[in-house]
Image: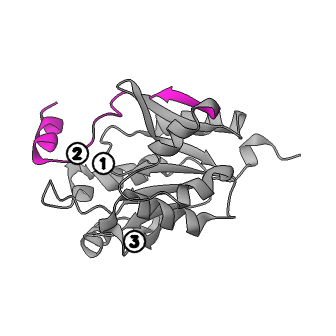
Amino acid sequence: MVKPKEIDFNILILAAGKSTRLGRAKQLLKFKGKSLLQNTIDACADLGSKEIIVVLGAHSDQIKSQLDLNKISLLYNPDYESGLASSISIGMKYLEGQSKATLILVCDQAYIHARHLQNLVNTWRNHITKIICSSYSQTIGVPAIFPSTYYNDLMHLKGDKGAKMILLKHKYNLISLPFEGGEVDIDTEQDYNNLLAN
């Protein structure tokens, strides 16, 4: 019998966006000495996943030049302008058949930290058929762990709709854990200024 701690999972970080409203690569905005994307990668580093995959698109060469590539695998989304769903789809097609679950994150949740992610993983290992997601500001969202039974749904998302659609569709089969600051993401220069001011 496979022990829960031995069950494989992967990590998928979505970082392909064009940052149109910001006007520059949000992935590389600095917060507490690191870029938002590097901070997200580092928060995932010791979770025990099989692989950490980062999906890039816009600004990919610039972003790659500033990342520690030793910890991650890169995928390129040529269709990044069509929206978030295309990055999820590319990632899930790559991961299909590789593991029992995938932890999906975005790169601009500034307050992401390893402790919350470890809580998600620990909860999933005890409830491996359930989706384990984050809750903040009276809603649910990523970071979230999706068992492989949901990979097909994730692969067929369209447009700028993220994984939250799957969470809402399957509310009967999920567990949410509070993520303080999870609602803080960076879409505009004002968002970034507010972050730095806090």
Question: In this view of the protein, which residue sits in the foreground, 49 or 149?
Answer: 149
Q: Is residue 118 visible?
A: no
Secondary structure at badge 1 equals: loop
Residue at 59%, 37% in the rendered image = 170
Question: In this view of the protein, which residue sits in the foreground, 80 or 55?
Answer: 80
Against 26, is 135 above or below? above
Residue at 10%, 42% in the rendered image = 190
Secondary structure at badge 3 equals: loop
Quarter of the image where the C terminus is located? top left
For marks 3 and 1, the one nearer the N-term is 3
Q: Which residue is mark 1?
A: 108
The answer to whether the residue labelled 2 contacts the one labelled 3, judged by CB atoms less than 8 Å apart, is: no
Secondary structure at badge 2 equals: loop
Q: Is residue 35 left or right of residue 180?
A: left
Q: Is residue 82 left or right of residue 95?
A: left
Which residue range is magenta in the image? 173-198
Q: Which mark is residue 186?
A: 2
> Which x, y percent locates residue 123?
63, 33
> Which x, y percent locates residue 134?
47, 33
Inspect the image, locate mark 3, and give the three-letter code of the amino acid beneath it. Answer: Asn
Q: Which residue is mark 3?
A: 77
How far apart marks 2 and 3 lie (CA) works out to 21 Å
How far apart marks 3 and 1 lie (CA) works out to 18 Å
